[in-house]
Amino acid sequence: MGAETAHHIATTLDTCFQRTYEVVAPDMRRLYENAKRDQWNAARDIDWSTPVDLGNGIFANELIDGWGTDALAGLDQRQLEQLNVEFSCWRLSQLLHGEEGAMLACSQLVDIVPGNDAKFFQATQVVDEARHAEVLSRYLLDKSGGRIYPLTANIRTLFDYILGHGKWFVKTVGLQLLAETFAVALFRMISETAKDPLLREICRRILADESRHMGFSILSLPDEIRGLSAGDMRELEEFTREALKLVLSGQFPQEAYEAVGMTAAEIERVKRVRKEVARGNEQTLFRKLFRREMHQTVVTNMKKVGLINERTSVMLRDMGIDPNMSPA
C-alpha cells in the first residue's frame, strides 16, 4: 500500500556442512517424519471458490480497538464495516510479514544447526513458512481487495535481529519460542472467532504446522542452553527480554483507522480507550484468554528449554508475566 516492499539485512553465517547421516536425535527425526506426513497444498487443499462477504466483516468486531465505545461514535455503518475489513487486513498483514521472516530465518537455520536430524526438519519448516506466506497473501490479495499493509517497526526490528544474528540458538529462541508463540495464540483466536469461515479454515491449517515448529525448540534447545558460557547466556537473556518487549508491546493499526477517514484527534481517542481497556477489566473474554494463553505458553516453553532463572524471572515480572504461572 505505497510503502517500502523490501530491505536488505547484513549477516554472516557459519555454515555447518554436516556429513554424519545416521539418526542421532530420534525425537527430532520423528518430528521430521511428521512434517513430511502432514504437508498440505495451499493451492489445492483450500477451497478458494468460497466467497468472502466483506460487508459482513472478517474478524469478530470485538477484536477491533474502540469497538462499542464512544471513540467510534462518529462512524456510520458503512465506515464501521470498512473498519472491520481494514483492521482485519492490517493484522493479517503483520502475520504475513512474520511468516515471510520465519521462512528466511529457517532457511538460515538449515545452514547453521549442527546435526542432520535438525537440518532435515528445518528444511520442512522452510516449506511450511513459504506455504503460510502463500496462503495469507492469497487471502489478502484475492479475497480482501488486495489490502496488504506495511511491516510494523516492531516486527522489522525483531526480524532484523533474528536474521542478522549468527548463532542458531538465538535465532531459535527469537523465532520458535517467542515470535511463534504470539502468532500461534493469534491464529488460534482467529480460527475460533473470525466471522469468515474461509479464514477460520486457513488458520486451522496453519496451526497444525505451528505446533511442530515450537516442538523443534523444545527438542533442540535444552542441551544447548545448559552448555552455554556465562557470556552467551547473558546475551540470550538480554535478547529474550528485548524480543518479548517487541512481541508484547501493543502495535496499533493506525493505517486502518486512517483508511476510513478518521482524523488524527479521533485516532488518538481510540488509542486512549485502548489503553484504558487494557488496564481495566473491560476486555472481551477471548482477548483475556488470548493474553493468558500467550503468557502461559511463553513461561511453559522457557521452563522446558531451561531459560527460566532468577534474572529472567525478574524480567518477566517487570513485563507483567508471572514466571510461576501454571503450565499452558
Image (tube, rainbow, N blue to C red):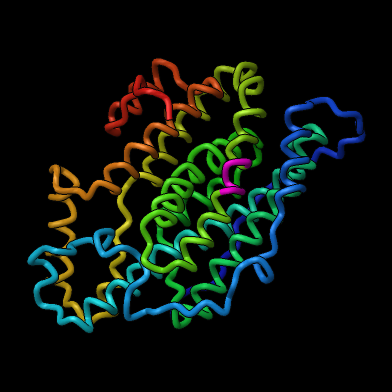
Secondary structure mostly taken by the magenta-highlighted segment of the chain: helix
Q: In the rendered image, which quarter is residue 2 located in?
A: bottom left
Q: Residue at x 31, y 63 (%)?
A: 60
Q: Residue at x 53, y 47 (%)?
A: 161
The verdict on residue 209 being magenta is yes
- Magenta range is 208-212
Q: In the rendered image, which quarter is residue 318 located in?
A: top left
Relative to 240, 171 lies left or right: right
Relative to 82, 166 lies left or right: right
Q: Residue at x 23, y 61 (%)?
A: 65
The verdict on residue 172 being magenta is no
Q: Quadrant of the N terminus?
A: bottom left
Residue 193 placement (x, y as % from top left): 36, 57
Q: Nearer the viewer, residue 86 or 315?
A: 86
Q: How many marks?
A: 0
Q: Residue at x 25, y 46 (%)?
A: 285
Relative to 82, 159 lies left or right: right
Relative to 323, 307 lies left or right: right
Residue 49 placement (x, y as % from top left): 57, 79
Residue 131 placement (x, y as % from top left): 65, 61
Q: Nearer the viewer, residue 180 or 318?
A: 180
Q: Would you say residue 58 is visible in this rendering?
A: yes
Residue 89, above or below 109:
below
Residue 188 placement (x, y as % from top left): 44, 50
Q: In the rendered image, which quarter is residue 77 located in?
A: bottom left
